[in-house]
Amino acid sequence: MSNKVLAKGLAGALAASVALVPLMASAGELVIESWRNDDIDIWNEKIIPAFNEVHPDIKVSFKPTPPTEYNASVNAKLAGGTAGDLITCRPFDASLELYKQGNLAALDDLKGMDNFSDVAKSAWQTDDGAVTFCLPMASVIHGFIYNKEAFEEVGVEVPKTREEFYAALDKIKEDGSYIPMAMGTADQWEAATMGFQNIGPNYWNGEAGRKALIDGSAKFTDAAYVDTFKELASWKNYLPDGYEAISYPDAQNLFSLGRAAVYPAGSWDISLFNNQADFEFGAFPPPAAAGADTCYISDHTDIALGLNADSKNAAEAKLFLEWMTGSEFAELYSNALPGFFSLSNHTVEVTDPVASEFVSWRQKCESTIRNSYQILSRGTPNLENDLWNLSAQVINGTLTPEEAAGAAEAGLAKWYAPHQ
Amino acid sequence: MAHSGPMTDWRKAKLPVIAFLAPATIIYTLFMIYPLLDSIRLSFYATPSGGEAAFVGLDNYRTILADPDWSATFWNSFWNNMKFFAVHMLIQNPIGIALAGILSLPQLRFRNTYRTMMIMPTMLSVVIVGFIWQLILSPVWGVGADLLDIVGLKSLFGPWLGKEGSALITLSFISVWQWVGIPLMLIYAALLAIPDDLVDAAIVDGATHFEVFIHIKLPLVLPTVAMVSILTFVGNFNAFDLIYAVKGALAGPNFSTDIMGTLFYRTFFGYQLQLGDPHLGATVASLMFLIILAGVLFYLFAIQRRLARYQL
């Protein structure tokens, strides 16, 4: 027992000393901290060279950490004064806490900040909206990706209303050659993120409903939320057998192997399907009820870049951030990573057909973000974790929609004054 | 015979004794005792948002044990942990004893092959074990359903890892599959130490191998069985990796696979939008320590002292 612990301790010390070496970057070199280790090639081969064409004298290096370790490691580095100059920001509270502790600088007077809408900035502002401390980079959009060949074979059209959507799913189920919808509840978060937060905005009217939850004028026990859970509960008829034990990669594989017709998606899934699916696929937004005049989509602010308040290269870092507010970066980033959409107001030509379909919904529908992210996940029990658990249970059939809505409201009422 | 040997001149022996004890003592103190005490100290503090850590006495313990939400979560994970432990005690250890008994039979062939195969899963990484079993039991790609089909029991197959009622039991079985080699090896070693003449005498007196095992071998290895039990207890109440690898830190569905290790991880490091709280996390860790301590003390005073030992 003690040998094992000793080995771990030594391994830890060794890892720490190795980890310290790359941190001692030379002065004048900008270091970007990020959790997007998947993107290292895109930064090194496209984004940083493009920046160096404008500012050849500023050296930039992209130093990612694995996503699961990012928060802990960046917090420790900031506390120890060894963090990079530019810090990739998680949305809402994780970054807000960094700002409050004085680790992130305010960026309101950054040139080009007015290229971003208030919704885009909302994830990286103080609660009163007075200070913005990270530069919004990209959002991800929810919707449904469908197998075009499957739709043709079964003879269903791309649904425009909720009624058409379920009629199409029924028809695919009856036909029997495809699983109507590829999703599972084993990892829980798909049920909440690709389910509840995907179809929900059409019920709670996007931003209006989200803000009403925050100021307490709406409650989870309202019809909008119960109905969202009801629609979610109906999904179990269309999911593959044993969906309770189907994980997120299982569902991705079911769809990319061509065994399923519809996949509740986040736009980040596009690149995986581009690589793996050998059939044509398209996308449609979560269908609203027939006769609804507005549609709503979850256009979730996911990633931003902030300035380390203790950076020794603050002037250069600001130049980099200013460059990022321009249209060149928006275009580069959106096309290098199909499915991550620039949050700036620049018109960006997205070349990937499915990604451009996703981003086109911004024109015809109203954007909103996931309702549990701002303020409401600050207490115990944590609303986001609750929604994962409750959404999965609603689909599994172990909770009724009414019970789930009641539990979410009760959890919020425990600590959040506007709901008490 | 006159008194001689190392006991006579303590002053001469003092230096080597200290020198030999020092490395273990220093390392153990530095890497085990100090972190343990510091973690307990941490549990008496709290950090308000943006403020400095302040001493709050037993407040964190009150939160975990008295706040309805926290205590429900805590006791849920405690009872899940008890179930996890019960499955190991009732399935893993009896199977380990039985396999050790069979392996020690004199006329068994391919003994070393069996032994290697049985200890093999123990050497695999937990992440790999979790991944393999998730694939075997997967309702989409798994061979589990096909295997049951061969014996005509396909109707019994279900998404066991995803159902509230069966997820924890399934995970316990996976853990048993992985770790059964440990009690097997320890008890097998104890069985080998039993002199052959005891067994031969019993056989001559007309006992069967089964009777020899029950009446002679088992009582003789009982101290080892007790030690295996306490190791199982400590290991199970520290368990975390398998659950985390298969179900994530939210230990679904509906926290039915949440054990104290996963609860500690969620509390200390945070999860998704839930920010970590090192102080509450340390409190959960200290409670785990107290539970394990209570179990070990119970073993030491109530069980170990009553065990009959035989000089062989």
Image (cartoon, coloured by chain):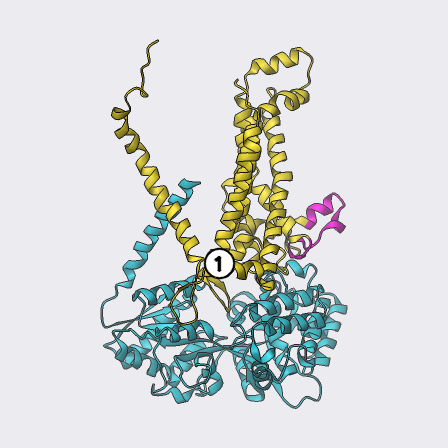
Residue B238 visible in the current orientation:
no
Identify the chain drawn in cyan.
A
Residue A257 sits in quarter = bottom right
| Front one among B129 and B88 | B88
Residue B163 sits in quarter = bottom right
Q: Residue at x 43, y 53 (%)?
A: B40
Q: Secondary structure at mark 1?
A: loop
Chain B on-screen colour: yellow
| Front one among A150 and B170 | B170
Residue A160 position in % (x across, y down): 67, 83
Q: Is residue A60 left or right of residue B170?
A: left
**Highlighted range, magenta:** B145-165
Q: Is residue A260 left or right of residue A14?
A: right
Locate the N terminus of chain A and report the quarter of the image it occupies.
top left
Residue type beneath disc 1:
Leu
Q: Is residue B226 left or right of residue A13?
A: right
To which chain does the residue with label 1 belong? B
Depicted A228 relative to depicted B40: above or below: below
Outermost residue to the front: B57
The residue pinned by badge 1 equals: B58
The stretch drawn in magenta includes residue B161: yes
